[in-house]
Image: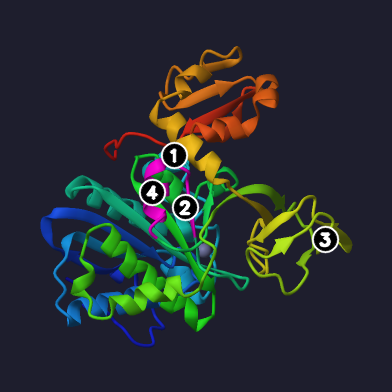
Amino acid sequence: MIQPETQNRTAFSHERRILGQFYGTNKGPTVVIFAGIHGNEKAGVHAADKVIHRINESHIKLNGNLHFILGNINALNKGLRFENEDLNRVWQNDHIVELETRKENLSFEEREQRDILQIIRNILNGQQGPFYFLDLHTTSSSSVPFITISDSLNNRKFSSHFPIPVVLGIEEYLDGPLLTYINEYGHIALGFEGGAHEAASSIINCEAFIWKALVHSKCMQESQLSNYKHFKSILTDLACEYKFFAIKYRYELKGKEQFAMKPGFENFERIRKNDFLAKSNGHKIVSPRGGRIFMPLYQELGEDGFFILKKVSKFWLGLSIVARKLKFNHFLRLIPGVRQDPENNYTLIVNPHVARFMTRPIFHLFGYRQQIYKDDKLHFIKRDRKIKSFL
Ligand SMILES: [Zn+2]
């Protein structure tokens, strides 16, 4: 067990990437919590410090194991989101293979990534499942806390324990987030956004999320934390409508575009079609559709101006559970223009002319996400998958 540095943390050391590690009985799960993958998001780190301190102080005995891991240590020390590249956009399989053979010319983030990869590998190879991976973040706009997941049924089930919005399928719009990489191995992986970067409430929200996650993963029991009810009420009292949302639109920044979001938007705020949202190179950008504004960009670094969300209906959620449990996805392969990738069981290769009629929502229903466009074909990858061992 490593002692935490609790109060007023200003300096982070590469020798102290593992903030805390607890080994309980062998029967429980293994929970892995990342904080500070973005160096300007310290709320998750402070929350992790507090939880570690409390577990030590109150002598809480855990079932299974618990790990707290720091993300971008160099960027945390400099107060930057990242130095050379976003540490949450570099987890593509081919990049990882290449990184492991390269000994020199490593960027700041590649060094961080290599260390983190080794820690994940040691945990997955040396400890027992079920594994829960949680990644703590904050946002540049004011926001209620929310969860992001790849839409697999196990992620959906675990996230339903938290009375806050859950955004499905963001990985279709982001290239190389850490949790998508972990999801490919079949493990539960939730991103938690605790609120605005500098808001004191973001630390409290992250702490409440960690305690709830420890209880619902069965790593500990409610009765082991004397004021668990207080933490439970922090997320419940926000009175968020607990709903699943899907991304329907992304405004992607291009090259040297001068982008400025109209001030004052809150995450999940309702917008209507043609509402004025932002300015690009001096021109007005209006909303192409109604819905909820999501992740409006109020900081300098970032590739996405904003997203627009739509609520996912209960009917669709239920139907998709049935479709996936009954394995109706096998019928997709019978459709002309759709075939199984001979090299990967989880991938369907789709002729884009077919996809135009089938449209992505059908693949989403069966638990597939669009991943890449290769050789004039669309590749859809299944998100629900059996656990496989880590290489
Ligand atoms: Zn972040």
Give percent across and percent down for residue 265: 70, 70
The answer to whether the beta carbon of the residue marked 4 is less than 8 Å from any atom of ligand 1 is no
What's the mark number on residue 93? 1
> How was this image coloured?
rainbow
Per the rendered image, the range of residues in magenta is: 147-161
> Mark 2 or mark 3, which is nearer the start of the sequence?
2
Local crowd size for mark 1, using a 10 Å CA cut-off: few (<14), some (14–19), many (≥20) = few
Foreground label between 3 and 2:
3
Give percent across and percent down for residue 291: 70, 55
- The kind of secondary structure element at disc 3 is loop
Q: Which quadrant: the N terminus? A: bottom left
Question: Between marks 3 and 2, how big is the CA–CA gap?
Answer: 46 Å
* Magenta segment includes 103: no
Give me the residue at 43% from left, 77% from top: 203
Q: Amino acid at mark 1?
A: Asn
**Residue with the mark numbered 3:** 275
In-front residue for pair 248/370: 248
